[in-house]
Amino acid sequence: MASMRLLAIIAILVQGLVIGDSQELPSFDPELAVAKVLEVAEGKVGPDVKIFNVVDFGAKPDGATTSTINFIRAFKEACNHNGRAMLVIPEGNFVVGSMLLSGPCTFQPPLMVQFAGNLLPQDSTVAAENADWITFMNFNGLFISGKGVINGQGEKKAWNSVCDGCRRQSANLKLIKLNDVLISGITSVNSKGFHMMISVCNNFVITNVNISAPDESPNTDGIHMSKTNKVRISDSIIGTGDDCVSMIHGTTNVTIENVKCGPGHGFSIGSLGHYEDEFDVFGITVRNCSLSHTENGARIKTYRNESPSKASGIIFQDLIMDNVKNPILIDQEYATIKGSVDSKVLISDVEFSNIRGTTISKIAIVLACSPTFPCQGITLKDIHLEYSGPPDHNEDTPFSSNCTNVKVNYIGQQMPPPCA
């Protein structure tokens, strides 16, 4: 059904919007954008689109020559073009250092990026750069599509130099202060830090991406977002050493569906309450996803800190767990340190629905809420989890749930049994 719908959308676009028509989309429609970006990946754009190929600006696809300045020059020309523009990264291995690709721009939105090559860091032995690796910033309209690979080569040295209090490692791809963005088809491998970092953005679609790093790679979140509104992540595979998707303060109206997560730390809202004056989080839906051999499944986590905020309107629905350690987790005692106070983050209106599969923990559900701001409106509906861990030396240990500072609304089947 989904493929038929997509074909129908493509047919409409072929008739008028993609081939040879200079009109831009009247507004950012995610369904139409997904269809359009398939044409961008193949370079099937109208004759009115001016091509800016990084090779024409001197970039070398030889896997040895540094091409940072050539990429920046190609982007600047595309950014300043008064019309429709497409930046082309062809097949080949391109070595680039840290790049800030920033507006304001004058092109007719969106800037299309046909991404077919492999990007390699200028010096993979450097533990951390002074900036994130590839940053798009401060313009409206960006479509990135293709089978290109961003390889951060974090395994060369960066992962071995992580320490408490150190600056975070550089992200493979940072997107900041952008509106109307679609990313499709690309692969991100072995980032030094986050794979994709999204902040202060609006109207974002990520689909059919592949993100991977070993489960022991530190802080390699797949998609990390903050202060961003209207995001849809779908039909993707994410396996890292940290959260598959992490949503911190100011993240609103997000839908995640048909995503395979694992290894990693699952789908996480938080950490919240970490900084002063944090914006609230609301309108988060994670559905029709699977998690395999992850540390967590559906998680909300907050610091024990003085910073107040709210997290509400959250749905985790139709999730399949395969040997997940903590399938359902609210943790308001995250990163507790000496002298900590109770979390001031109020969590409310959260539903865990139709979550099934296996867990390696005898305590499969943990809802540890704040004593000062107890959780409100927490619903567990049709939960069916089975213990799949090693034999317990104490066979009398029950398969159970653990709840503190919360009154739970139970609907339908419950396994493990509800909290007392």
Image (cartoon, rainbow, N blue to C red):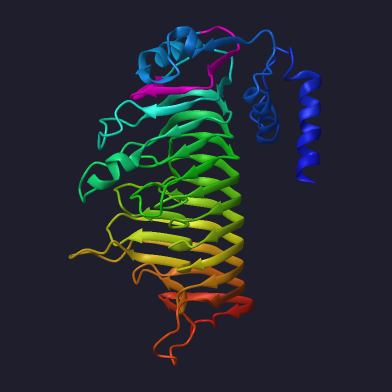
Please tell me whether residue 96 belongs to the stretch shown in magenta.
yes
Residue 332: quarter of image: bottom left
| Number of disc labels | 0
Could you tell whether 371 is left or right of 136 in the image? left
What percent of the width, then of the height, locates residue 152?
Answer: 38, 35
Above or below 178: residue 20: above
Q: Is residue 273 in sight in this rendering?
A: yes
What percent of the width, then of the height, locates residue 53?
Answer: 52, 12
Q: Residue furthest bottom?
A: 396
What percent of the width, then of the height, locates residue 166?
Answer: 21, 44
Residue 233: quarter of image: top right
Q: Nearer the viewer, residue 321 or 18?
A: 321
Q: Nearer the viewer, residue 305 or 246?
A: 246
What percent of the width, then of the height, locates residue 199?
Answer: 42, 37
Above or below 190: residue 367: below
Could you tell whether 7 is left or right of 196 in the image? right
Above or below 396: residue 401: above
Identified at 48% across, 82% down, the residue is 400
Please tell me whether residue 59 belongs to the stretch shown in magenta.
no
Identified at 30% across, 49% down, the residue is 275
Q: Is residue 79 in sight in this rendering?
A: no
Identified at 43% across, 18% down, the residue is 103
Residues in magenta? 81-101
